[in-house]
Image (tube, rainbow, N blue to C red):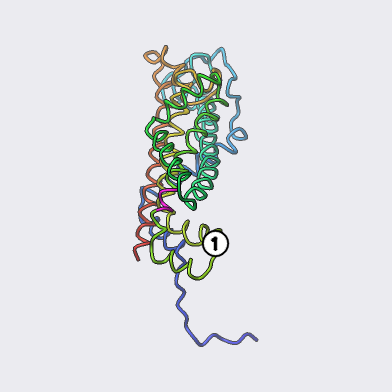
Amino acid sequence: MPRPNLYYEERMPSPLERVWLEFRRNAFAMGALYLLSFIIFLSVFGPLLTPYGPNQQFIDAISLPPAWSTSGDVRFLLGTDELGRDMITRLIYGARYSFALPLLVVLMSATIGMLLGAVAAMTVGVKSSTLKHILDVLMSIPSLLLALVIIAITGPGLSNALLAIGLVMIPQFLHVTRNAIHDERRKPYVTASRLNGVSDVYLLTMVFFPNIVRVLVIQFTIALSVAIFDITALGFLRLGAQAPTPEWGSMLAQSLEVAYVTPWVMALPGLALFLTLVSVNLVGETLRQAIQKQLEQ
């Protein structure tokens, strides 16, 4: 027979739990988080849910309005485009190209940039100073302009656009990580850790990074928003994803010629892009505020 517990012990939430509890207080942020989770779900399992292919054409259903219109068809809930392709299917497939791929690119760039930034922050002297000036020059150039230069060298295409954006994002994470760690190096808790004889690896992983996570969250949110926007912009300029790839920017470019006849063909990918960018920035800003409040306690 188990013995009853006669002592009451109040359980204090962990720092991560307190950040989550603070994040949950913002209803708009929770809605944005649910929307991003839904977009990720569609990016992974969307092809299993759609009854049609992204480029499948229906000759008898060209330029149909959404299903709730008087001339709509229930088979195509959001209508069809000028070639008779189902809009909802193309939007779901487009989430892979306009959200999932930029997310993977930013994750890879963040990993490489933070590692290089941490190494750069632990070095001093001429090498560190030279690297700082080079990064300042790169950071002064807009990311889309750098991506255009790289694409001009490698040629148009979705893979080249992703490569260009990934290369552009690495210096940004490197610069932010290096500066954040450099600002923390002279603080008392870092000096105390050094006096305890901890290794550089322990100093980076257990001392520096937990205290600069707020800065990294801000940079990751900005980088993801910029990556999504740049992928869409390059697709719109026909330098990224090429037709008939169902990427949102490419879909916007293709809809220019029929925007007045079938406005939903332009409005739907534009709305999807708008909601995605707003959700990313809202989740990132609320998470930053929650982490900042936790650090101040």
When the figure is inspected, residue 71 is found, relative to residue 91, above or below; the finding is above
Q: Which residues are magenta?
A: 178-182
Residue at image point 55% right, 39% down: 104
Task: Give the total number of marks visible in the rendering.
Answer: 1
**Side of 198 relative to 178 (left or right):** right
Magenta segment, principal secondary structure?
Answer: helix
Residue at image point 38% right, 52% down: 288
Please state which of residues 162 and 268 is positioned toward the viewer in this rendering: 162
Q: Callout 1: helix, strand or loop? A: helix
- Rendered-image quadrant of the N terminus: bottom right
Magenta stretch holds residue 125: no
**Side of 278 relative to 116 (left or right):** left
- Rendered-image quadrant of the C terminus: bottom left
Residue 220 x, y percent position in the rendering: 45, 44
Residue 285 x, y percent position in the rendering: 36, 47
Residue 287 x, y percent position in the rendering: 40, 52
Please state which of residues 105 and 14 is positioned toward the viewer in this rendering: 105
When the figure is inspected, residue 188 is found, relative to residue 108, above or below; the finding is below
> Residue 71: which quarter of the image?
top left
Residue at image point 46% right, 33% down: 228
Please state which of residues 8 and 12 is positioned toward the viewer in this rendering: 12
Judging by the rendered image, the residue that carries numbered circle 1 is 202
Q: Which residue is farthest front?
A: 126
Residue 239 x, y percent position in the rendering: 49, 19
Q: Name the residue type under label 1.
A: Tyr
